[in-house]
Amino acid sequence: MAVLKDYEDIIGKRNIRQIEMLAKLSRNKKVVMVNSTRDGGGVAEILHRLVPLINELGINCRWEVISADKDFFSITKKIHNALQGEKIRFSGEELEIYRKVNEDNARNLNLDADIVVIHDPQPLPLIDFYKARRAKWVWRCHIDMSGPDLRLWKFLKNYLEEYDASIFSIEKFSKSLSHPQYLIAPSIDPLSDKNKVLDKDEIKAVSKMYNIKKDKPVILQVSRFDRFKDPIGVIKAFRLVRKEINCQLILAGGTASDDPEGEAVLEEVRKEAEGDPDIHILLLKPKSDIEINALQRIADVVLQKSLKEGFGLTVTEAMWKGKPVIGGEVGGITTQLHNHRTGFLVNSIEGAAYRIRYLLNRPLISKRIGEQAKKFVSENFLITRHLRDYLSLFYILENPGKNIIYTGENEINGGS
Ligand code: UDP
């Protein structure tokens, strides 16, 4: 696994030094990150890399995962969907299970730390069972909160108001809250198996494994099988494109242990594809990082046709590989794709089909957009920037009111 020094070639010595200086200010502090799954989805993806790097810098950072049964995850998936705007009614019993599972976890988890970072809504109520706390508690929201169901939001806000701060991925998700809110964009690790450079043989092996021939252009979407990722819309857009251009579609994704809807959505996708030999539906196992990396490199155009999206790491991953990406004009995708510069944003199946055709017919433009996309990611969405934001946040939480951090070498503007 890469250590901080390994990123020197990508971000330069000075930036590495600044991260080290910033970390010194929080040295020996204890931080604990809490989420609901160790595998599957963007949060786990980030924590797998961020936690070791924070530790390497002399801050004691642990990662705890709440344990729960299927009933709880069905409820929290509904909470996730409602926060992303679906109108869902919750029974008193469901909300009680949500609370009770958190109460049980509060008894079993070790959250002894100076700073507790709770990711997403599943473990949000934990705070209620730590009344006599000395740690700073932060809620890190990764989902698209642009238009939550207001009844549910009002309920969850009671928990959230107990926190010392919250973090959102983009400004549009911020809310009226009595504590400070910080903006931190997610990131990818350029040196992880998912994003590192692969050699030709490695890519070929993955093509062979999934029986993908590069005899016609490849359109790809990598996503959990989730309705908000609109896999059905992707198939429909592909069918419109194929009327004019002979091409193939890969829909690759797995399930996450905290997402019980995956199987049902996968079935819907298979039904829609009707056994079409040009639609490859790949059910990926957990930890298929090299496979995803290769598929993103094989693709000519990458889609992320989400209808709601907190950020969309799959967008960042493909951009980093120099691919032209077409994304739904929603949530965090809008901070990554800028029309004609770093990719394209679309609002419909027809719009997606139009942009796929546009890019497949213009290889030089596709190449240029891909190069600009890669540069944009390298300047904004790499794990080293994310690390720096977290280190700034740790310092600010412990030193409220400061918005300039003196590291002894440089000053760093705190907050975002
Ligand atoms: N991913 C994966 N296997 C899958 C599907 C997705 O490893 O079968 C990864 C994907 O490469 C990305 C993350 O999971 O790193 C998904 O993050 P994103 O922000 O795109 O969506 P989320 O699943 O968090 O809604």
Image (tube, rainbow, N blue to C red):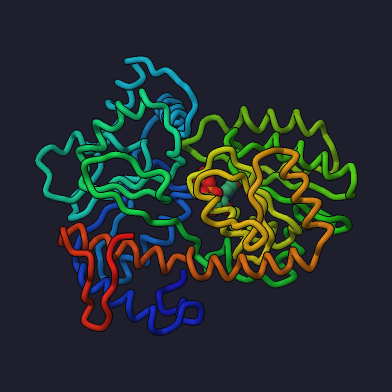
Q: Is residue 404 above or below residue 107?
A: below
- Percent coordinates x, y for residue 250 in the rendering: 74, 47
Q: Quadrant of residue 154?
A: top left
* Residue furthest to the left: 132
Q: Residue at x 53, y 70 (%)?
A: 378
Q: Is residue 352 above or below residue 201?
A: above
Name the one closer to the observer, 243 or 137: 243
- Percent coordinates x, y for residue 228 in the rendering: 57, 36
Q: Residue at x 23, y 69 (%)?
A: 404
Q: Residue at x 26, y 40 (%)?
A: 177
Q: Is residue 32 above or below residue 254?
A: below
Left or right of residue 333, residue 305 in this image: right
Q: Is residue 134 above or below residue 130?
A: below
Count of number-bearing discs: 0
Q: Residue at x 48, y 63 (%)?
A: 381
Q: Is residue 287 visible?
A: no
Left or right of residue 360, residue 113 in this image: left
Q: Where does the C terminus fall, quadrant-wise?
A: bottom left
Left or right of residue 202, residue 406 in this image: left
Left or right of residue 95, residue 164 in this image: left
- Percent coordinates x, y for residue 310 in the rendering: 48, 45
Q: Is residue 335 visible?
A: yes
Name the one closer to the observer, 40 or 120: 120
- Percent coordinates x, y for residue 136 in the rendering: 18, 50
